């Protein structure tokens, strides 16, 4: 059985990833504080900001399932300009974005190695390249890329690939609309500034995840795919 562990499956990008995987025949386990959006998911309630609770949940799942896929999607922004960045925020996002990925992967590793197959997909962000007010978020999302490249080198001989999907502005997500109101002039201006002239949707990210998740993607590892409408390229008008 193909068993996928998806963090943050209760809404937005995580919900879309869960649905795409369920439709493809995966058994999907959503780790989140809230019930998953798709009722076909197995739900494990956990606060990933709590390292002890995350470890307990990871061990429980690994005892009950031979995990084949991990998609670490859960994230928080904690926006602040540099003078206002709190060390506690950086520590919290380090736990959420980096340490929880480590805990979950370590728990799943024995079954992946035994099977000679595994797919680990970390959801980073276009903000890993830098964005005002995103000190803690950008730093930890960039850290995911370095971590994935290291894991890819270590796990490649075991048939386990590790890749990163880095979304740009994705509407219909709580994090995005907490900053940019839906259907607002600001949303319209942002869409116009993106090279493809639209905002992304959760399904855009989910399709990228499914590409990396496929058994047919075995020759691709340690890579970062920006799903951002070209916004990661960066451009100026002269």
Image (cartoon, rainbow, N blue to C red):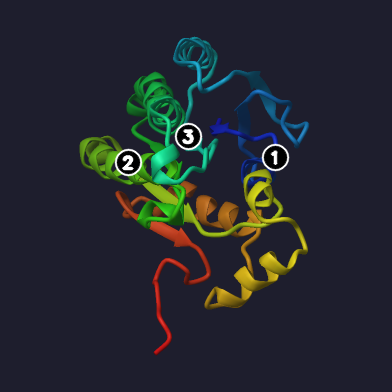
**Residue shown at 69% from the left, 34% from the top:** 10
Residues tagged 3 and 1 counted as in contact (Cβ below 8 A): no
Residues tagged 3 and 2 counted as in contact (Cβ below 8 A): no
State the SS at label 2: helix
**Residue shown at 38% from the left, 25% from the top:** 99
Q: What's the CA distance linking mark 2 and mark 1? A: 24 Å
Residue position marked by numbered label 1 in the rendering: 11
Residue position marked by numbered label 2 in the rendering: 143
Q: What's the CA distance linking mark 3 and mark 1? A: 17 Å
**In the picture shown, does residue 124 fall above or below 158?**
below
* 195, 20: nearer the viewer: 195
**In the picture shown, does residue 225 fall above or below 89?**
below
**Residue shown at 61% from the left, 37% from the top:** 26
* 136, 119: nearer the viewer: 136
In terms of sequence position, does the residue under pointer 2 or pointer 1 come before the other? 1
State the SS at label 3: strand
Residue position marked by numbered label 3 in the rendering: 70
Rendering coords of residue 118 (x, y %) = 40, 36
**Residue shown at 35% from the left, 42% from the top:** 139
Horizontal relation, residue 177 to residue 31: left or right: right
């Amino acid at each position: 059985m193909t068993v996928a562990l998806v963090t943050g499956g209760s809404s937005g990008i995580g919900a879309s990833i869960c649905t795409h995987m369920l439709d493809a025949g995966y058994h999907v386990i959503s780790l989140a504080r809230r019930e998953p959006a798709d009722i076909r998911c197995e739900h494990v309630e956990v606060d990933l900001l709590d390292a002890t609770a995350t470890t307990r949940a990871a061990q429980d799942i690994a005892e009950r399932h031979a995990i084949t896929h991990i998609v670490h999607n859960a994230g928080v922004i904690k926006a602040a300009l540099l003078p206002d960045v709190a060390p506690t925020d950086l520590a919290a996002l380090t736990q959420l974005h980096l340490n929880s990925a480590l805990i979950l992967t370590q728990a799943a590793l024995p079954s992946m190695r035994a099977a000679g197959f595994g797919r680990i997909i970390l959801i980073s962000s276009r903000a890993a390249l830098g964005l005002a007010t995103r000190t803690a978020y950008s730093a930890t999302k960039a850290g995911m890329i370095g971590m994935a490249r290291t894991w890819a080198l270590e796990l490649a001989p075991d048939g386990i690939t590790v890749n990163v999907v880095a979304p740009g502005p994705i509407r219909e997500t709580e994090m995005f609309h907490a900053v940019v109101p839906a259907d607002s002039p600001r949303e319209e201006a942002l869409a116009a500034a993106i090279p493809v002239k639209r905002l992304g949707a959760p399904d855009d990210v989910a399709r990228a995840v499914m590409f990396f998740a496929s058994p047919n993607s075995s020759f691709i590892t340690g890579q970062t795919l920006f799903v951002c409408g070209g916004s990661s390229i960066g451009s100026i008008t002269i």
